[in-house]
Image (cartoon, rainbow, N blue to C red):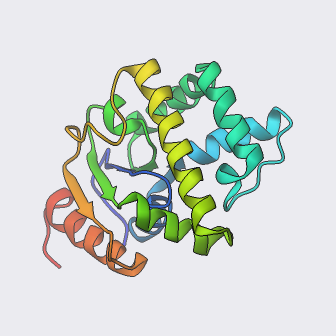
């Protein structure tokens, strides 16, 4: 289904293992929009810096966590990526999978996927094949460092200040298909102003 509306921008955000990347990719494909991911852009930067970044689960690996610590010490990495994401957002017709764009880009439709730390740890256990205690430790460390990066760089409280969002979806007990169907319905009705 091709969108004919100019400058459509949909931003998805949520904490680690909430399902935002999966949902964002599927929405971009359904509506034939560009998919832009802050995480993938940071991963490409990590590769250029010599990290052995891989797709699924790399961020939660020891190497990924080291890169997160490096970002905490030097926020220019995130600033460069966010500048690129803002440029794509201004061009429109994009689904942004980003932790910062809901606060930095003033237009667009913004969605927060809300999932408890316990459920996110379970999802990480399943996805990465690690123990639940290890997943809980990683979630706690990653959430804390990520919040520090963005509060220091931009002044917003990531995961706490949900003021920019048009929709907060409690996806705790939803499957990825249910999240996708719910978001599709909302986008059709509220963003595209049409009924199914």
x 19%, y 49%: residue: 166
Residue 174 occupies quadrant: bottom left
Quadrant containing the C terminus in the rendered view = bottom left
Asked if residue 109 is positioned above or below residue 164 in the image, the reply reads below
- Say whether residue 158 is left or right of residue 161: right
Provide residue 98's location: percent of width, then percent of height: 46, 44
Quadrant containing the N terminus in the rendered view = bottom left
- Say whether residue 176 is left or right of residue 64: left
Provide residue 154's location: percent of width, then percent of height: 40, 21
Asked if residue 34 is positioned above or below residue 102 in the image, the reply reads below
x 41%, y 24%: residue: 151
x 35%, y 20%: residue: 155
Asked if residue 140 is positioned above or below residue 144 in the image, the reply reads below
x 50%, y 30%: residue: 82
Spot the residue most to the front.
133
All told, the count of numbered labels is 0
Asked if residue 87 is positioned above or below residue 194 in the image, the reply reads above
Is any part of residue 148 visible from this angle?
yes
Provide residue 126's location: percent of width, then percent of height: 59, 75
Is any part of residue 28 visible from this angle?
no
């Amino acid at each position: 289904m091709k969108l004919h509306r100019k400058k459509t921008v949909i931003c998805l955000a949520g904490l680690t293992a909430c399902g935002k990347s999966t949902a964002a990719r599927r929405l971009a494909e359904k509506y034939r929009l560009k998919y832009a991911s802050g995480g993938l852009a940071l991963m490409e930067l990590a590769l250029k810096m010599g990290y052995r970044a891989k797709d699924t689960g790399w961020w939660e690996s020891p190497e990924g966590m080291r890169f997160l610590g490096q970002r905490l010490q030097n926020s220019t990495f995130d600033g460069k990526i966010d500048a690129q994401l803002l440029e794509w957002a201004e061009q429109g017709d994009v689904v942004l999978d980003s932790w910062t764009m809901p606060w930095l880009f003033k237009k667009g439709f913004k969605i927060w996927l809300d999932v408890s730390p316990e459920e996110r740890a379970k999802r990480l256990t399943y996805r990465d094949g690690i123990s639940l205690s290890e997943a809980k430790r990683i979630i706690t460390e990653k959430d804390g460092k990520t919040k520090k990066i963005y509060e220091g760089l931009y002044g917003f409280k990531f995961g706490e200040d949900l003021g920019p969002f048009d929709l907060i979806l409690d996806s705790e007990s939803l499957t990825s298909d249910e999240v996708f169907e719910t978001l599709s319905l909302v986008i059709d009705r509220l963003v595209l102003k049409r009924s199914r």
